[in-house]
Image: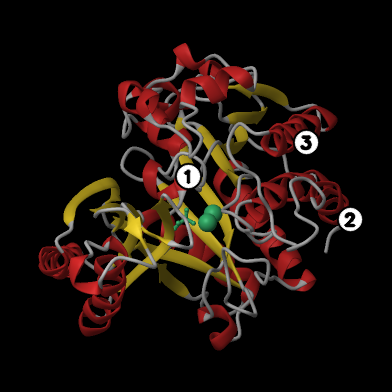
């Protein structure tokens, strides 16, 4: 691990960490997020980089410019990731990309490599969507993939709206919206990320290049039944939405298995949530992903159909709302191949090119900006959990790979 990486990692480590679980709870616009943002700004300033906060709350640290307004179209080379987390997330998903970006810049300076192009490091806000239910809010707003009107409707579990949360954290929610000039300034965006599977572990490579992101989305299933007494209501008289929900979870697994796709109910809320009461409402969130759109449509349609059939049998009313969707992302071939060439030279062998089922800000930007990703080996393959891991040597390999890429893209 490079010295600067190690130091940054130690500083960031305690922020938003739950000591009971060892997991991170860095949700958008909370105190933990504010601490992470202060850390980012301090890193920028310590390196003499120009710090900039954009209209959507994303943070930028510029070398060779004071902000995107100084940059000719397509000139900037940008790297970075996010610092927020899922509930009890691991240490690497997001922060590895941000810390490696600063460490790669330190490495460029150590090499005496002078960027001929403006370089920026970015921390995109609210990538995980843990608080407001929609992933990649910062990059979606910037790219115009989420309208300010729709963003203003987002609420957390306590009913706090996104504008209220931003305001409480000291940001201006009236400013949010598309930022096309900023994106036009970017010639290449490269996001380094911990791998969220074991492909690199299996191939024996510390670093790989991304090919594509599976299409994926989130659907909310509301099962409305009738609250009643658990001890006095005959089974025949119940309208129990938990039954319909349970059958839907099993159907989701079956549909995904048959199609070679993924379907997960990872979040649920129950009303009135009493141990001795039949629920009146069970609300479950489906996350589903597949290699192609047609398969994903088939899987989600099959799950909806199974849910509707079961709900009808249980006397339960069902409504399904698609809360977010990200179409398939095929990263730009020219940039991907350029990265492979740069990294292949150092590695003296071809670098693996892999797809992923995980969403990223790089995926959101890829519609507008030439975008690529680097993955760093994760020996457990586990992600969105405290068991997420990366070896120190592999973190170093990631930093050096990113430095090679930035040098190749910006220093010529
Ligand atoms: O959920 C995802 O795929 C991402 O990690 N936000
Ligand atoms: Mn994640
Ligand atoms: Mn991530």
Q: Is residue 343 above or below residue 281?
A: below
Q: Earlier in the sequence, mark 3 or mark 2?
A: 2
Q: Secondary structure at mark 2?
A: helix
Q: Is residue 377 above or below residue 286?
A: below
**Residue at image mark 2:** 3
What's the CA distance linking mark 3 and mark 1? 21 Å
Q: Is mark 1 within 8 Å of ligand 1?
A: yes
Q: Is residue 157 above or below residue 237?
A: above
Mark 2 is surrounded, within 10 Å at the Cα level, by few (under 14), some (14 to 19) or many (20 or more) other residues, namely few
Residue 54 appearing in the image = no
Q: How many marks?
A: 3
What's the CA distance linking mark 2 and mark 1? 32 Å
Q: Are marks 3 and 2 in contact (CB under 8 Å)?
A: no
**Residue at image mark 1:** 129
Q: Quadrant of the C terminus?
A: top right
**Residue at image x 76%, y 52%?**
17
Pick the residue in front: 340 or 275. 275
Q: Give the side of residue 248 with respect to residue 50, left or right.
A: left
- Give how far across and how far down residue 85 sits, in percent: 60, 50
Q: Quadrant of the N terminus?
A: bottom right
Mark 1 is surrounded, within 10 Å at the Cα level, by few (under 14), some (14 to 19) or many (20 or more) other residues, namely some
Q: Please tell me whether mark 2 or mark 1 is closer to you in this view.
A: 1
- Give how far across and how far down residue 215 sits, in percent: 28, 59
What's the CA distance linking mark 3 and mark 2? 17 Å
Residue 37 appearing in the image = yes
**Residue at image x 32%, y 65%?**
242
**Residue at image mark 3:** 39
């Amino acid at each position: 691990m490079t010295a600067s990486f190690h130091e940054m990692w130690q500083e960031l480590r305690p922020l938003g960490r739950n000591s009971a679980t060892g997991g991170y709870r860095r949700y958008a616009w909370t105190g933990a997020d504010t601490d992470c943002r202060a850390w980012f700004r301090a890193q920028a300033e310590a390196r003499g980089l120009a710090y900039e906060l954009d209209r959507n709350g994303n943070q930028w640290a510029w070398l060779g410019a004071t902000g995107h307004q100084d940059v000719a179209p397509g000139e900037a080379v940008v790297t970075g990731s996010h610092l927020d987390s899922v509930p009890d997330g691991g240490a690497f998903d997001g922060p590895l990309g941000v810390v490696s970006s600063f460490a790669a810049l330190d490495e460029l300076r150590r090499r005496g490599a002078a960027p001929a192009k403006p370089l920026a490091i970015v921390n995109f806000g609210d990538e995980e969507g843990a608080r407001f239910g929609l992933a990649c809010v910062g990059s979606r707003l910037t790219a115009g993939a989420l309208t300010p009107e729709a963003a203003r409707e987002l609420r957390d579990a306590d009913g706090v709206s996104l504008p209220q949360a931003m305001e409480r954290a000291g940001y201006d929610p009236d400013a949010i919206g598309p930022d096309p000039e900023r994106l036009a300034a970017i010639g290449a965006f490269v996001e380094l990320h911990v791998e969220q599977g074991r492909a690199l572990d299996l191939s024996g490579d510390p670093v790989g290049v991304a090919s594509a992101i599976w299409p994926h989305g989130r659907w909310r299933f509301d099962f409305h039944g009738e609250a009643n007494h658990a001890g006095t209501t005959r089974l025949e008289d119940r309208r129990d939405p938990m039954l319909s929900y349970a059958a839907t979870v099993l159907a989701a697994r079956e549909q995904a298995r048959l199609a070679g796709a993924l379907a997960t109910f990872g979040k649920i809320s129950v009303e009135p949530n009493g141990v001795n009461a039949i629920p009146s409402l069970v609300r479950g969130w489906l996350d589903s992903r597949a290699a192609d759109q047609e398969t994903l449509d088939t899987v989600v349609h099959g799950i909806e159909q199974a849910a509707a059939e079961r709900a009808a049998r249980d006397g339960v009313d069902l409504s399904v709302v698609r809360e977010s969707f990200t179409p398939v992302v095929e990263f730009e071939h020219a940039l991907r191949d350029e990265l492979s060439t740069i990294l292949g030279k150092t590695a003296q062998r071809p670098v693996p090119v892999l797809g992923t089922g995980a969403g990223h800000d790089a995926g959101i930007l890829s519609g507008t900006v030439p975008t690529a990703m680097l993955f760093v080996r994760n020996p457990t393959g586990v992600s969105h959990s405290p068991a997420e891991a990366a070896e120190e040597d592999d973190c170093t390999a990631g930093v050096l790979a990113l430095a090679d890429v930035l040098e190749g893209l910006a220093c010529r």
